[in-house]
Amino acid sequence: MKRITGEYEKLGTLDYFIPYPLPPQNPNFELSGDLALLYGKAMQRLGQLNEMALRIPNAQRFLKAYILKEALLSSAIEGIHTTLIEAFTSHLTQQKPSKDTQLVLNYTKALDVALTLIQKENLPIISRVFLAAHKALMQNGEGDKADPGNYRKQSVRVGQLVPPPAHKVPQLIAELEQFINTHESLPPLIKAGLAHVQFETIHPFIDGNGRIGRLLIVLMLVDSALITTPILYPSYYFKKNHLEYYQRLDGVRLHGDFEGWISFYLRGIEASSFDAYQRAIDIEKLEQQLMLLIQNHKAFSKKQEDAEKALAILFQFPIIGIQTLADNLGKSYNTASLLIKEFITLNILEEPEQQKRNKLFSFNAYLELLEKEYPQEV
């Protein structure tokens, strides 16, 4: 049976698609059969990842890299490309970051702004959160053409879809807010998947809808306590299967196939969780190995505590200058310089060959782990 998910409204020469409020009806969405199995697997992997995050002491050290990974992947889906190294070094150089690098950094800021609103100010996930996140996402690199922090006031076209007319957007977002914050008949993981497709169909902004919509998934999982920190990067799977990603989103509007979308989405959550989990294990092993090396090396016998703190800082800033290390350690420039020299001797850091002044040193073992491709379970 084909489910009708919205209606068309003709204004001028355009047929605008206006989605019905969630949850899906006629027939109602049911989590049964194969979907229930996929849900169980996704929840198991998500729980495994969250347990790992809770186990690692001071997991905040690794959080920046995980958020950057989602920022890179989510942006790449939209044709915005940069690298982890460019993102990590942008604040350390005198040069202005490229437009693409700035947009990726904006994503990390958007997530931070949104999390602050829902965790520290105890706001539910509402319009104010969407608008604040969008303002942060588009404030640099795009300019006023994206009207940062405001819903669109004009018509847009996305492929064959003409999303709702601008005057309908506030009401549609209000209905989505209500579903997110009050509807309890569906599990939070499923609600996040449905909210994403609804957000993309409403397409409330001139630009940045895909990135804010994928950010919404992470926000909802954190808000519902399925993950304690934004250590998940769902765009990992969406990027690898970007054609199917768009086909599944279209399938909801064209055929009412919410089940097909949720099936794809759950596979994505499972795969992304497993990838993040494997990466966390390897990061933990690397830290343990290097900590043991520091504790047993005679060069650090009188400054072991400083060296251990410096190592923790490297997991936050895997590309670092002497002054940055000194500032974060709360030690002198000379102390930081000596630590970096010893880290170079032990192959923890690599010194640039060409750079003479304001040198930046690379924590390559960590950077390689962040870029590593892990095989997925069959």
Image: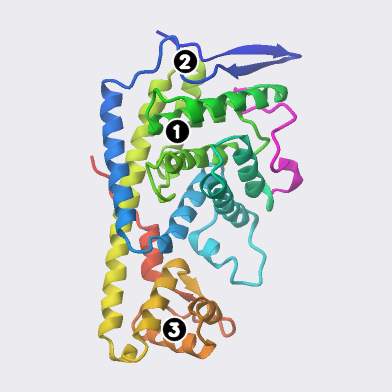
First of labels 2, 1 by sequence position: 1
Residue in view at x 34 percent, y 45 percent: 273
**Helix, strand or loop at mark 3:** helix
Which of discs 3 and 1 lies nearer the camera? The answer is: 1
Q: Is residue 186 left or right of residue 119?
A: left
**Helix, strand or loop at mark 2:** helix
Amino acid at circle 2: His
Local packing at callout 1 (Cα closer than 10 Å; few below 14, some 14-19, many 20+) is many
Q: Is residue 306 left or right of residue 333?
A: left
Residue 82 x, y percent position in the rendering = 54, 56
Local packing at callout 3 (Cα closer than 10 Å; few below 14, some 14-19, many 20+) is many
Write down the quadrant of residue 210 in the picture.
top right
Q: Is residue 146 magenta?
A: yes
Q: CA distance from mark 2 to mark 1?
A: 20 Å
Amino acid at circle 1: Ala
Q: Are marks 2 and 1 in contact (CB under 8 Å)?
A: no
Write down the quadrant of residue 376 in the picture.
top left
Dominant SS type (magenta): loop
Residue to which mark 2 is pinned: 255
Q: Are marks 3 and 2 in contact (CB under 8 Å)?
A: no
**Helix, strand or loop at mark 1:** helix
Residue 288 x, y percent position in the rendering = 27, 70
| Label disc, if present, on residue 71 of the rendered structure | none
Write down the quadrant of residue 221 in the picture.
top left
Residue to which mark 1 is pinned: 192
Q: CA distance from mark 3 to mark 1?
A: 44 Å
Amino acid at circle 3: Ile
Residue to which mark 3 is pinned: 340
The stretch in magenta equals 142-161
